[in-house]
Image (cartoon, rainbow, N blue to C red):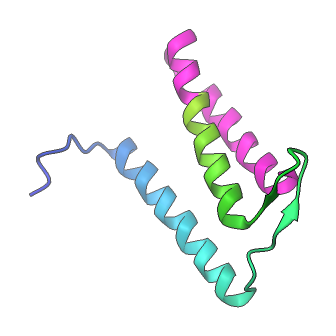
């Protein structure tokens, strides 16, 4: 059924993580509407969804740069990506 794409467990976990994050943001938005807009260190006024998008975009760049410059293993860029996500939701 899904043979058109080479699904692996790491790929599935990435998509599960993204959809879980979106689900959490939906639940938070239902409980506290308004998006929690604020101006961060980048000088942008962002909402929770904007911060999720910036963190996902930065995470993809971190992993691509690591693969291009260093290669395997991917534990260090995972730690960097988690730190980047925390920074985005905390300060951006």
Residue shown at the point (21%, 40%) measured from the top left: 6
Q: Give percent across and percent down for residue 64.
A: 52, 25
Residue shown at the point (91%, 46%) measured from the top left: 41
As drawn, 8 above or below 52:
above
What is the magenta range? 63-92
Quick one: 76 or 29, which is closer to the camera? 29
Residue 30 picture quarter: bottom right
34 sits left or right of 52 in the view:
right
Q: Residue furthest bottom?
A: 31
Q: Give percent across and percent down for residue 72.
A: 49, 17
20 sits left or right of 86 in the view:
left
Is residue 70 among what the camera can see? Answer: no
Is 48 covered by the magenta stretch?
no
Is 81 covered by the magenta stretch?
yes
Q: Give percent across and percent down for residue 23.
A: 53, 73
Residue shown at the point (74%, 75%) measured from the top left: 35
Residue 50 picture quarter: bottom right
């Amino acid at each position: 059924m899904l043979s058109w794409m080479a699904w692996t467990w790491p790929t599935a976990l990435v998509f599960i993580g993204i959809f879980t994050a979106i689900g959490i943001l939906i639940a938070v938005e239902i409980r506290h509407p308004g998006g929690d807009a604020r101006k961060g260190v980048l000088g942008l006024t962002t909402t929770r969804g904007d911060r999720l998008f910036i963190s996902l975009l930065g995470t993809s760049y971190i992993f691509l740069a690591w693969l291009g410059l260093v290669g395997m293993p991917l534990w260090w860029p995972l730690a960097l990506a988690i730190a980047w996500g925390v920074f985005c939701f905390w300060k951006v």
